[in-house]
Image: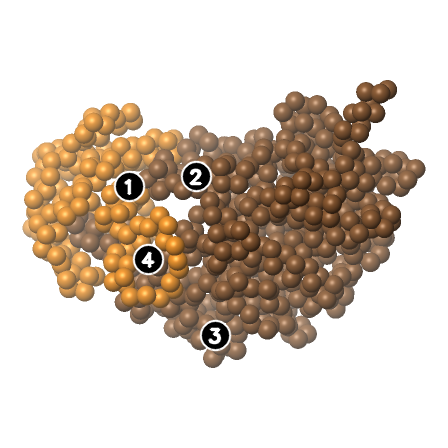
């Protein structure tokens, strides 16, 4: 008895955070800075900033097989390989092996992920954009799904808060559809990108700007500035882009209030019928297989959209037979991603005497311009573009007639300029796009596996026509030659922006979370990863996860201090 | 046949001249003519037969010979090619490559009554130029053996330290980004 009480005391904290990625790092930082003794759980291994980035400073000749993995290893990454860019000799240690982490697809769904401290904050694309007032009003305006219980003014101060700490470089434009962040100086466009920018302004009254990225253009909060190596996804030895490992977790550790526990797979949230609250989480130790319980007064789920939704679905009780907080029946539904891989590219003649210095880990961004003032297209919502221009390198030599010294000489001189852009479009929430758990098929830790039934629908396909044709039209208007278009949607999930399966809303009958990311019916459980998103907008979502996590964590800490939780 | 090849050779130089804006550096032309004897060096083939290894070495050096900078074989390209074919190709791709390599070798032998690696430099260059030209002009959508081989040769060479730093320009840590600067300030194509 005494032993049990002692064990219970040792396993009791003020707060538990499940997950260490973009959102979990922020929850951990804000909760610990509020003085809460916080246990941070990560299902994968530990990754220490810099020392656990084994390939970060390798030159091309230090990587075997020109950075390609052996064919024999490909079978372990059947689904992770679908991106075409994630599984390299230099980066494969950041991605799960599909043979260890199986899932099922009723329809193709590309679930691309890494399990380790820092999660996908190590490999993310770092594009950082605010949602706009228009985005938070969109569902109400269009009568789609449910209304966001939050408006831009509620979250704007929290965008300020996270941007000041994270460091976002970019250019202020004053656009209503893409509010400015608290920016570090922008990176430069190159000369051909400038041509497109001017042409778009003159011909279409549309804006092109440098990408807004969580890469530091000057030293910031003790982290070094970008060295323009463009090797971000190996981990940055300068801490020059935002990751949990470089930024939020060290800040949380600094408070002395964080206990970080890797190899901890959360099985479920423990619910107490009497108090109507959660009391802790059940964890499977990934190394020993042992089931351990940890207790706290508040729980933050930041296990990623699919991870957190799975934990809630697996947290069954008499009160919640269909998963914790699932009175609405919406848990696991309304899965969204961004749809992309559609756009245009071509060649630009001229600027033969111009080149660039450095490898910019960023491109240009074209903010949304469709359906801004009412809907005048045959689809709802809109899209933005990401793209870049560059001069061709040695690869063009393969299809040249030259061989021998002529070939060497040819490729030693930079080739012509090419420019291309890819659209990222908003995907509407739809109840039929869903995930659920298969309890009959468990993984090697005995946990249920996930099944996806998600597809792009008519609105997305209709939007893609504009996404493709507008790209070609804008390039041609700028004088780009040999313009060609492409359209290959792949599976939902390929944008690696899964969201929406525990959506926020005003009504407990139709949503899982309230406007504070709090489960309507279990107020001491907060979910602040992508699963809270009521609509997707067309902007890259990570900055919003940061802002909502910081807001919810400060609210939770405040409520706890007031004795409300 | 040899007349055709001579025409191809002249066209090659002419065309290259056009691409480079009419400037050809004499040392590079001499580099082609002086040639070099391809040897596998201290590399012990695991997948390739002795004949295949010798052809791979000779062919890589025809595509990227020694001139002001080292030849493909001097920076380990033949070994790299074997490693790529052996380790990153599927069984089917590997067989297709080996068949293509043997066909290439046999065709040279039947036309010129010598093994490719024993042929004289001029013959090797002209035969290879011709094969490359046919592939480039006739197969815009596919990658016949010679183009797959050429791609592997370039990949191995330009991801080697010599290729990246002596022929191209490589900066491990550029330190800054300038979007628009005179090409002379960089000098050569960026390796990465």
Residue annotated with mark 4? A392
Q: Residue at x 48, y 74 (%)?
A: A200
Q: Quick check: can you spot residue B118?
A: yes
Q: Chain of mark 4?
A: A
A386 w.r.t. B83: above or below: below
Same chain for labels 4 and 1? Say yes or no: no
Q: Residue at x 71, y 65 (%)?
A: A152
Q: Chain of mark 2?
A: A
Residue annotated with mark 1? B160
Q: Residues within 10 Å of mark 4 (few under 14, many from 20)?
A: some
Mark 2 vs 3, N-terminal side: 2
A4 w.r.t. B18: above or below: above
Q: Residues within 10 Å of mark 2 (few under 14, many from 20)?
A: some
Q: Is residue B7 left or right of residue B136?
A: left
For mark 2, give the secondary structure.
Answer: loop
Which dot marks residue A200? 3
Residue annotated with mark 2? A55
Residue A507 locus on image (x, y percent): 84, 56
- The answer to the question of whether label 2 and label 4 lie on touching residues, with beta carbons closer than 8 A, is no
For mark 1, give the secondary structure.
Answer: loop
């Amino acid at each position: 008895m005494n032993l049990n009480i002692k064990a219970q005391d040792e396993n009791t904290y003020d707060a538990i955070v499940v997950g260490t990625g973009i959102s979990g790092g922020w929850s951990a930082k804000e909760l610990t800075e509020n003085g809460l003794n916080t246990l941070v759980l990560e299902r994968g291994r530990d990754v220490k900033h810099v020392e656990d980035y084994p390939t970060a400073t390798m030159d091309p000749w230090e990587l075997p097989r020109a950075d390609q993995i052996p064919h024999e290893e490909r079978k372990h990454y059947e689904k992770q390989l679908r991106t075409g860019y994630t599984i390299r000799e230099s980066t494969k240690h950041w991605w799960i092996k599909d043979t260890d982490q199986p899932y099922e697809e009723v329809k193709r769904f590309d679930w691309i992920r890494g399990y380790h401290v820092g999660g996908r904050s190590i490999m993310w694309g770092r594009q950082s954009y605010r949602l706009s007032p228009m985005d938070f009003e969109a569902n109400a305006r269009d009568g789609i799904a449910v209304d966001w219980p939050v408006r831009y003014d509620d979250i704007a101060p929290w965008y300020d808060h996270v941007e000041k700490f994270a460091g976002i470089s970019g250019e202020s434009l004053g656009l209503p559809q893409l509010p400015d962040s608290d920016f570090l100086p922008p990176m430069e466009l190159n000369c051909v990108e400038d041509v497109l920018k001017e042409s778009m302004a003159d011909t279409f009254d549309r804006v092109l700007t440098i990408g807004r990225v969580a890469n530091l253009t000057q030293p910031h909060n003790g982290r070094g500035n970008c060295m323009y190596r463009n090797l971000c996804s190996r981990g940055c030895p300068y801490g020059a882009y935002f990751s949990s490992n470089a930024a939020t977790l060290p800040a949380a550790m600094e408070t002395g209030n964080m206990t970080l526990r890797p190899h901890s797979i959360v099985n479920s949230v423990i619910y107490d019928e009497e108090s109507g609250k959660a009391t802790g989480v059940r964890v499977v130790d990934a190394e020993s297989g042992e089931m351990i319980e940890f207790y706290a007064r508040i729980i933050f789920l930041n296990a990623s959209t699919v991870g957190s939704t799975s934990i809630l679905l697996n947290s069954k009780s008499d009160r919640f037979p269909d998963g914790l907080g699932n009175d609405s029946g919406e848990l696991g539904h309304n899965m969204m991603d961004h749809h992309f891989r559609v756009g245009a590219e071509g060649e630009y003649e001229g600027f033969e005497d111009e080149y660039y210095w450095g490898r910019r880990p960023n491109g240009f961004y074209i903010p949304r311009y469709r359906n801004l003032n009412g809907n005048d297209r045959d689809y709802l919502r809109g899209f933005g573009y990401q793209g870049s221009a560059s001069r061709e390198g040695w690869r063009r030599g393969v299809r040249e007639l030259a061989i021998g010294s002529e070939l060497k000489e040819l490729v030693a001189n930079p080739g012509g300029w090419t420019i291309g852009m890819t659209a990222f479009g908003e995907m509407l929430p739809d109840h039929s796009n869903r995930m659920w758990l298969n309890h009959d098929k468990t993984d090697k830790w005995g946990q249920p596996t996930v099944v996806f039934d998600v597809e792009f629908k008519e609105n997305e396909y209709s939007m893609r026509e504009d996404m493709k044709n507008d790209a070609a039209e804008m390039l041609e208007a700028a004088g780009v030659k040999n313009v060609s278009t492409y359209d290959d949607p792949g599976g939902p999930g390929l944008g690696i922006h899964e969201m929406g399966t525990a959506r926020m809303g005003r009504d407990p009958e139709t949503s899982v979370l309230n406007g504070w990311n709090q489960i309507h019916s279990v107020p001491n459980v907060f979910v602040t990863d992508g699963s809270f998103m009521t609509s997707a907008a067309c902007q890259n979502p990570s900055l919003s996860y940061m802002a909502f996590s910081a807001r919810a964590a400060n609210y939770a800490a405040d409520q706890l201090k007031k004795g409300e939780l | 046949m040899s007349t055709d090849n001579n025409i191809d050779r002249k066209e090659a130089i002419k065309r290259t001249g056009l691409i480079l804006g009419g400037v050809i550096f004499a040392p590079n032309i001499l580099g082609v003519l002086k040639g070099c004897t391809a040897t596998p060096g201290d590399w012990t083939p695991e997948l390739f037969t002795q004949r295949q290894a010798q052809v791979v070495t000779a062919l890589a050096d025809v595509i990227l010979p020694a001139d002001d900078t080292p030849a493909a074989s001097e920076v380990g390209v033949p070994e790299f090619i074997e490693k790529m074919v052996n380790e990153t190709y599927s069984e089917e791709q590997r067989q297709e490559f080996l068949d293509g390599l043997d066909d290439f070798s046999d065709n040279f032998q039947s036309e010129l009554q010598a093994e490719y690696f024993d042929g004289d430099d001029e013959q090797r260059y002209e035969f290879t130029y011709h094969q490359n030209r046919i592939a480039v002009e006739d197969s815009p959508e596919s990658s016949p053996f010679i183009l797959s081989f050429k791609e592997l040769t370039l990949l191995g060479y330009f991801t080697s330290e010599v290729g990246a730093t002596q022929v191209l320009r490589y900066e491990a840590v550029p330190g800054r980004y300038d979007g628009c600067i005179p090409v002379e300030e960089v000098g050569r194509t960026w390796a990465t």
